[in-house]
Amino acid sequence: MPPPANDRGDGSDTGPTRAAVILPFERHPRSIGPVPDAAPRAAEARLAEAVGLAASIGVTIVHQAIYPLRERRPSTYMGEGQVADARQQIDEQRVALVVVDAALTPVQQRNLEREWRCKVIDRTGLILEIFGERARTKEGSLQVELAHLEYQRTRLVRSWTHLERQRGGFGFLGGPGESQIEIDRRLITDRIVKLKKELEQVRRTRGLHRRQREKVPYPVIALVGYTNAGKSTLFNALTGAGVYAQDQLFATLDPTMRGIRLPSGRRAILSDTVGFISELPTQLVEAFRATLEEVAAADIILHVRDVAHPDTAAQRADVLHVLQEMAAGANAPLDEGWQNRVLEVLNKADLLGGVGEVPGGSADSAIAVSALTGEGLPALLEALDERLSANMETVRYAIPSADGARLAWLYRHGEVIERADTEEDVQVTVRLSPTDRARFEQPAP
């Protein structure tokens, strides 16, 4: 018989849940999106990531193991001997929760729970649990709930006793009625339909906000990157904002936007988005489409990488893979030329000894920085300024001296290169984007 639940640390009497993390590891070459030659992810790094994910929901990790796989078993995913060995460790360590770092089918999850006599969740379930705890805004909560219900709808196959009950039929004939599992599935489906309608309203509202920003068109710079790459720390360093940033996976989920001023004096909007992760659940990619639309509308996509991480190349491939998926299909939110807008930020240079020790950190397509110490941030701002100025046009205007509003507009939206004041007017040479030039030269109604 399995130990009592509280003896395994379910949190009722003895504190945090005692958990084990198991990685069924398959060696296979990676071929992802625009990076076909990315190195395969090391088993130890995969396990460390899974342990970090599990620890972030407050459980105590008492056991972790890697099991090499020759082939996947339809019934239990792993081999019989591996399942038996894991069960022995689970019993000895009094484990109440097992996290299997793989995508389990409902049948595999049920069978492993029977074999190990404890709760089992897979990688998708774990990530959904984390997202559920971290989402703060209404939009984030709706997205997480939708993703969770899409996942849970396929899991209504377990041998829960309440799912075996029948309810009375309608009409005079009676009949077997509707089983509890059918009712649960119908309720979940109804809730999913309602959530999708609410999220569609969120997307429309976000589109209205985007069109309002276009009327005062500050360029948008979107931060993307692998989870825990330091996006929020970089966001805070550049904007002075107080966005929550910790050395943990998925520290922040909800998008945040702040204004920044570049060295030329030009203003821009910086957007911090949710972090990506390898094998991101399909449900989350779909559910967070509204959030990822901010990336699609960005003038510059800042890809923040943890350059000190041993799997930095594989993490880069995972992020590019998700972005590539956003550019695929007829209604893709991301345009085909998105790669031309990407600027890589090689963060956490302080862990390698400084910006000068980062290979390739001074190239046109990559800037080495340390968001924690601030080293390299001036060079990053200069690079952003240069990128945004690439398509700007240099024009000269004579502004009447009394028209201070138009002159101030040029200072806010352009880069004033030269100015000469006379008694009648102000001669200014300014660099403007094509959109801003058209707006400035448009005749007043």
Image (cartoon, rainbow, N blue to C red):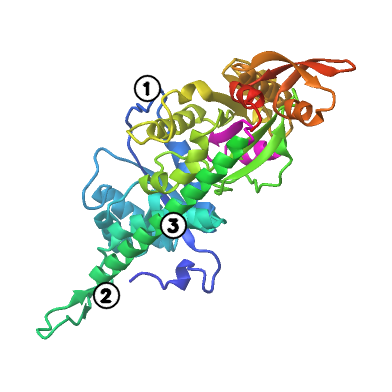
**Label 3 packing within 10 angstroms: few (<14), some (14-19), many (20+):** some
Q: Classify residue 178 by image quadrant.
A: bottom left
Q: Dot 1 lies on which element? A: loop
Pair 3/1: label in front? 3
Which-is-in-front pick, marks 2 and 3? 3
Please report the bounds of the magenta region as a residue range: 216-236
Q: Which residue is mark 2?
A: 161
Q: Is residue 435 above or below residue 120?
A: above
The first of marks 1 and 2 along the sequence is: 1
The span from disc 2 to disc 3 (Cα, nearest Å) is: 33 Å
Residue drawn at the location 21% of the way across and 80% of the way down: 167
Q: Is residue 352 left or right of residue 158?
A: right
Residue 441 seen in the figure: yes
The quadrant in which the N terminus is found is bottom left
Q: Is residue 232 left or right of residue 190?
A: right
Q: Is residue 155 above or below residue 2?
A: above
Query: Residue 395 placed where, x, y %?
Result: 69, 14
* Residue at x 71%, y 38% (from the top left corner): 239
Work out how far the residue at label 3 is from the one at label 1, CA to CA, in angstroms. 38 Å
Q: Quadrant of the rendered structure where residue 42 is?
A: top left
User: As shown in the figure, which amino acid type bears the numbered disc 1?
Assistant: Pro
Marking on residue 198 = 3
Query: Any magenta on residue 325?
Result: no
> As drawn, which residue projects farthest toward the left?
173
In x, y percent, where is residue 278? 43, 38
Whether residue 89 is visible, yes or no, is no
